[in-house]
Amino acid sequence: MDEKVSAKADQAAIASPRRAPSQQRSRERVERMLAAASALIAEQGSDAMRMGEVAEKAGVSIGSLYQFFPDKRAIVWALAERYTAESQACISAALKDVGDAEGFKSAFSELVDIYYQLFLAEPVIRDVWSGTQADKALRELELADSRANADFLVAVLKRLRPGADPVQLETTAFLVWQMGEATVRLAISVDREEGDRLVAAYKGMALRELVGK
Amino acid sequence: MDEKVSAKADQAAIASPRRAPSQQRSRERVERMLAAASALIAEQGSDAMRMGEVAEKAGVSIGSLYQFFPDKRAIVWALAERYTAESQACISAALKDVGDAEGFKSAFSELVDIYYQLFLAEPVIRDVWSGTQADKALRELELADSRANADFLVAVLKRLRPGADPVQLETTAFLVWQMGEATVRLAISVDREEGDRLVAAYKGMALRELVGK
DNA sequence: TTACAAACATGAGTAATCCTCACATTTGCA
DNA sequence: TGCAAATGTGAGGATTACTCATGTTTGTAA
């Protein structure tokens, strides 16, 4: 009972540590668990995902699941972290070699497309982020991720527009990036045609904002 | 069991109908239930809200709760619907008498401020919408709400820019409105100073997009 | 090879929680 | 006043996240 109380009091607490898999066998089993969770989330959403189903689909016992994941949220978190790392790598790669405004425009446009395709291909991503608002820890992971991504934008923009006010630049970049994430999430929940229009409209809006008309 | 299966199969199903309160006494009790739920959501979030607590706080039995709300989601839905109605009224009022571009600018700016204040003052609102992505029915309510609000914008913009392409206009208005909601939600989850900056940046961005530079 | 500790695996059981249902009480009205 | 419909109740059924006592496998040092 006292355990439950403390869990409530500190909702943002990171899941208490569990053994990390150190043997080949267990590493493979953990992979299977994550793959099973991913598939189930894609089917029904992370909320409807049942720990028993994850275990069954992964071919492990329920106890093994809890050997490596302290609770249900930790599984979602683990998947979220993977996508976060993936997206950051993708962004830094896309923006690394931008030299002028034209280069930025095409790099940014391509970046948005990649994101859009990623979300279209992996409905799990959206679902992994779905609990974002409800789960404080996930919300903060997402915010940190977004800031990190915006920082890439800021770094590039500072090169392109040396005279601009840094605070203004950071605010704009952060906002534009958040808008991009919101747009993509929105785009994949409407029909494809409208989604494409929305993404295109966002691109124009963002570019006007970031590099002027 | 078969009941459970059907519930899973149709996650978006609106909660099965329950008796609507027809007597004065029960109407008051339902109000108390919603007030209790609202207070609990403000404290701990809708996910942590316990039906037993709602009943206790409202001074009714658990059975009475289920007399009027088929399930937990229905309570959240009921609160969400109220805010939806409120916001629509607020928007239509703010945009009703807009005549020219200048009038639109100030009306829009004021509208955003009102929204921002509303979210700042009522953390329940954010929490009510927090499950939005996970809960299909809520997600669709939010989308419908957003479209309805964007339609107000479209109507005004058609008056201000008669020559513009209607599809383009609708896409932009819908996007800008969604961005606004995302901005406000973002703004209240960072510190006040940054939140203010983000909202201001959004206003500039949206107005440039909607009525040009 | 063998002994042994640490890592790993198991699944029946515990606790928390949503929701039902059989029965009691109150209200509006003929 | 009597009665049907509306409302009120809370113990208990059903589901599910998570634990733990116990058994099995693996790496390793003698």
Image (cartoon, coloured by chain):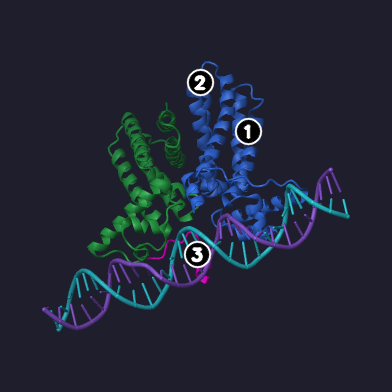
Chain colours: A green, B blue, C purple, D cyan
Q: Residues within 10 Å of mark 1 (few under 14, many from 20)?
A: many
Find residue A188 and report its image quarter: top left
**Compared with residue B154, is residue C12 higher up or lower down, i.e. above or below?**
below
Please, what secondary structure does the residue beneath circle 2 have? helix
Q: Nearer the viewer, residue A93 or B60?
A: B60
Q: Are marks 1 and 2 in contact (CB under 8 Å)?
A: no
Left or right of residue B104: residue A44: left
In this figure, which residue is indicated by the disc labeled 1?
B91
Please, what secondary structure does the residue beneath circle 3 have? helix
Amino acid beneath label 3: Ala
Left or right of residue C30: residue B29: left
Rendering coords of residue B56 (x, y %): 66, 61
Subunit under mark 3: A
In this figure, which residue is indicated by the disc labeled 3?
A7
Q: Is residue B25 magenta?
A: no
Seen at 53% across and 67% down, the residue is A5
Sequence order check, earlier mark of 1 and 2: 1
Q: Are marks 2 and 3 in contact (CB under 8 Å)?
A: no
Left or right of residue A160: residue A3: right
Find residue B203 and report its image quarter: top right
Amino acid beneath label 1: Ile
What is the magenta range? A1-17
Image quadrant where one finds the C terminus of chain A: top left
Left or right of residue B44: residue A128: left
Seen at 65% across and 57% down, the residue is B63
Q: Nearer the viewer, residue A86 or B82?
A: B82
In this figure, which residue is indicated by the disc labeled 2?
B166
